[in-house]
Image (cartoon, grey):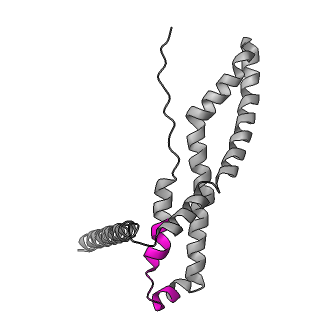
Amino acid sequence: MRGSHSLMRVFTLTGQGTLRVLGDFGAMVIFFSIAFINIFRRKQLREIINQVFYIGAGSSPIVMLVGLFTGMALGLQLFYTLVKFGSVGALGSAVSLSLVREMGPVLTAIMVTARACSGMAAEIGILRISEQIDTLYTMRVDPVRYLISPLIAASITRRPLPICPVPQEID
């Protein structure tokens, strides 16, 4: 009798956890769907343009700085390797190709996420703590349409596009 009680408890806890995860996932899908639909409402264009500038042009200096220092470190490491083979002339090409094709999109995505997305999350958190979101509800302004929809639209349009290398023929 004791074994069946503990087995029942395991199934109960597993079922409750699964239902909680499914409920949270459903809430996220509904929230994102409402926010995505609100992108296409009127009066959103100005805020979307502001967010596109913040994500795109505002993140450019940090992306360039990270690319510069990564390129310098990569060049230094490749120099020591290429000296052993007498191929130092290929250093510039190797660094530029590895940065542009391989590391550039990854570093850009990481830096945009680190700067823009964490800033957006912090801004929404501060608005929640200072009860400004509740004030929007009081003024009958939809916070999802006013705050979240422009962020989603700007994030979708300003995501870093991967650079696809052009296949080259080998002689």
Residue 134, given in percent of the width and then of the height, sits at 50, 87
Q: Which residues are magenta?
A: 135-150
Of 49 and 29, which appears nearest the observer? 49
Residue 170, given in percent of the width and then of the height, sits at 49, 12
Residue 91: within the magenta? no
Q: Is residue 7 above or below residue 162?
A: below
Q: Quadrant of the N terminus?
A: bottom left
- The majority secondary structure of the magenta stretch comes to helix
Q: Residue at x 32, y 72 (%)?
A: 23
Residue 73, given in percent of the width and then of the height, sits at 74, 35
Q: Residue at x 63, y 54 (%)?
A: 57
Image position of 140 (left or right of 119) = left
Image position of 7 (left or right of 95) = left
Of 118 and 43, which appears nearest the observer? 43
Work out which residue is located at the far top of the displayed protein and give it: 171
Quadrant in which residue 36 is drawn: bottom left
Residue 102, given in percent of the width and then of the height, sits at 56, 34
Image position of 115 (left or right of 134) = right
